[in-house]
Structure formats: C-alpha cells, structure tokens
Image: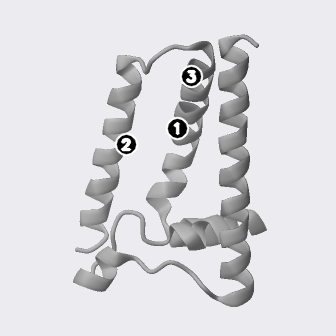
Amino acid sequence: MAASEARLRRLLAWLAALLLLGLGYAWAMARLGVGLPCPFYRLTGLLCPGCGVSRLCIALLRGDWAGAWAANPALCLALPPVAVLLAWRGIGYVKGRGPARWEDRAWLTLAILLVIFGVVRNL
C-alpha cells in the first residue's frame, strides 16, 4: 500500500469518527437538550468567540440560515474559508506535504478576527 493511500485511509477514518461524534452530539442537543456549557462564559459571564457554535451547527443541520446567523455571525462568515483551508490541508496531508506558510497566516488571521469579534460582541 502506498504511503498516500495509507494517509487517505487514516484521514477518512478520522473524518468518519468526527462525523459520528458530531451527529451524536447534535442528536443529544436536539433530543435531550444536553449540551456542553462554555467554560469562559461560566467563569466571566462574557460570550467567547465560539459561544453559539452548537446552536449554529444545529440550525445549519436544519437548514435554518437565519438561526445560524443569529447564533454566531462571525463563525457563519468563517465557515467557507475554514472549509477551504481544511480541504486544502487534507489534500496536502494525503500528498505528504506540510502546511504552506500562507495556510499558517490564514489560520492566524481567522483566529485574530474571531478574537476581535469576541471582544466586540461583549461591548
């Protein structure tokens, strides 16, 4: 088996595990009303940049774009570039390439923008 084929199988196994975990969490949120509390919110009473991500994901699974936007607009805007970056990284991993410098800069830019959003949303 070629190294790239082994990496592809490993990546697909991880993606399947994450998908199952995410769907299980979505089921628990929707059916049982059980979700993970935000430790930052619990400690400070302030919304972190990721607050609302569970509600956002549930809304997207339902096709409720307005609900997703209401839950966390910054993450709604970040979803397309994050998807592209993750897909590019997955392809690079399968091909045996390390991350490019622009990838690191893109992730850093997204992180900075989310932190700025986190500050602004609490003003």
Report if residue 116 is visible in the image.
yes
The front one of 28 and 46 is 28
Marks 3/1: CA–CA distance: 18 Å
Choose the circle earlier in sequence order: 3 or 1: 1
Q: Nearer the observer, disc 3 or disc 1?
A: 3
Going by the numbered disc 1, the residue's amino acid type is Pro
Marks 1/2: CA–CA distance: 9 Å
The residue at which mark 1 appears reads as: 81
Q: Position of residue 90 (x, y in %)?
A: 60, 28
The residue at which mark 3 appears reads as: 93
Q: Quadrant of residue 27?
A: bottom right
Q: Position of residue 89 (x, y in %)?
A: 54, 27
**Are the two marked residues, 1 and 2, in contact with CB atoms closer than 8 angstroms?**
yes
Q: Position of residue 94 (x, y in %)?
A: 63, 20
Label 2 CA crowd tier, 10 Å (few <14, some 14–19, many 20+): some
Choose the circle earlier in sequence order: 3 or 2: 3
Query: How many callouts does the rendering have?
Result: 3
Residue 110 got which mark? Answer: 2
Residue drawn at x 40%, y 76% as measured from the top left: 38
Choose the circle earlier in sequence order: 1 or 2: 1
Q: Residue furthest top?
A: 2
- Quadrant in which the N terminus appears: top right
